[in-house]
Image (cartoon, rainbow, N blue to C red):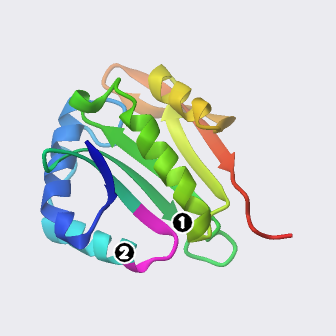
Amino acid sequence: MSIRLAAVEDAAALDSFFQQLDKETRFMLYEAGERPSDVEGQRQRLTAMVASPNQRIWLLELAGEIQGFAVMIGGGLRRNRHCALVVMGLRQSARGQGWGERLLTTLIAAAPGCGISRLELGVMAHNEVAHGLYRKCGFVDEGLRRRAYRLADREVDEISMGLLLPSGRT
């Protein structure tokens, strides 16, 4: 497996990956079949991301097939461009092998070079594996969004987490 930055040419493969990921997990925002397949939209998002100084998406690949992603989406205004939202996901075949930690540490290491000094994310409270991974990588719990998600049979809380990085400012 390898980790690399996404390019505009990855649009179709990324679109296909997200369709598969949505079928395999209940921990992502989209349910299976809910995310529209849109290769051109994916191409446009990747083009904008490549052009942005504080946005990046890393891909985890095995034999040329995407198995995971980690995205950093920095704010668009002067007051929040130092802060970025983190979202990541792995296909079933890539879980439990340390790849999630490698993806996340790659993102964390690159963030200061993109002008990011704060990372934040949300994790469903019952997703103990992801919560543990985020804590292992330095994120701390900052709050609880009660009943933030509705899974078919119940409502689920979201834990808000943050990680402060060196800002380069004195």
Residue drawn at x 50%, y 35% as measured from the top left: 123
Q: Quadrant of the N terminus?
A: top left
**Foreground residue among 66 and 126:** 66
**Foreground residue among 96 and 72:** 96
Q: Left or right: 66 with respect to 105?
A: left
- Horizontal and vertical percent for residue 53? 50, 76
Q: Determine if the magenta segment contains residue 55.
A: yes
> Is disc 1 surrounded by few (<14), some (14 to 19) or many (20+) residues within 10 Å?
many
Residue drawn at x 22%, y 47% as measured from the top left: 18
Q: Does any portion of residue 87 appear in the rendered image?
A: yes
> Eyeballing the image, is 56 above or below 160?
below
Mark pair 2, 1: CA separation: 12 Å
User: Could you tell me which secondary element the residue under label 1 belongs to?
Assistant: strand
Q: Left or right: 120 with respect to 87?
A: right
Residue drawn at x 68%, y 36% as measured from the top left: 140
Q: Determine if the magenta segment contains residue 3.
A: no
User: Could you tell me which secondary element the residue under label 2 belongs to?
Assistant: helix
> Is disc 2 surrounded by few (<14), some (14 to 19) or many (20+) residues within 10 Å?
some
Task: Give the numbered dot on residue 74.
Answer: 1
- Horizontal and vertical percent for residue 82? 65, 67
**Foreground residue among 77 and 4:** 4
Q: Quadrant of the C terminus?
A: bottom right
**Which label's residue is closer to the chain start, 2 or 1?**
2
Residue drawn at x 55%, y 34% as measured from the top left: 134
> Eyeballing the image, is 47 above or below 113?
below
Residue type indicated by callout 2: Val
Residue type indicated by callout 1: Gly
- Horizontal and vertical percent for residue 161? 62, 40
- Horizontal and vertical percent for residue 159? 58, 33
Residues shaded magenta? 51-56
Tell me the residue that label 2 is attached to: 50
Q: Does any portion of residue 32 appear in the rendered image?
A: no
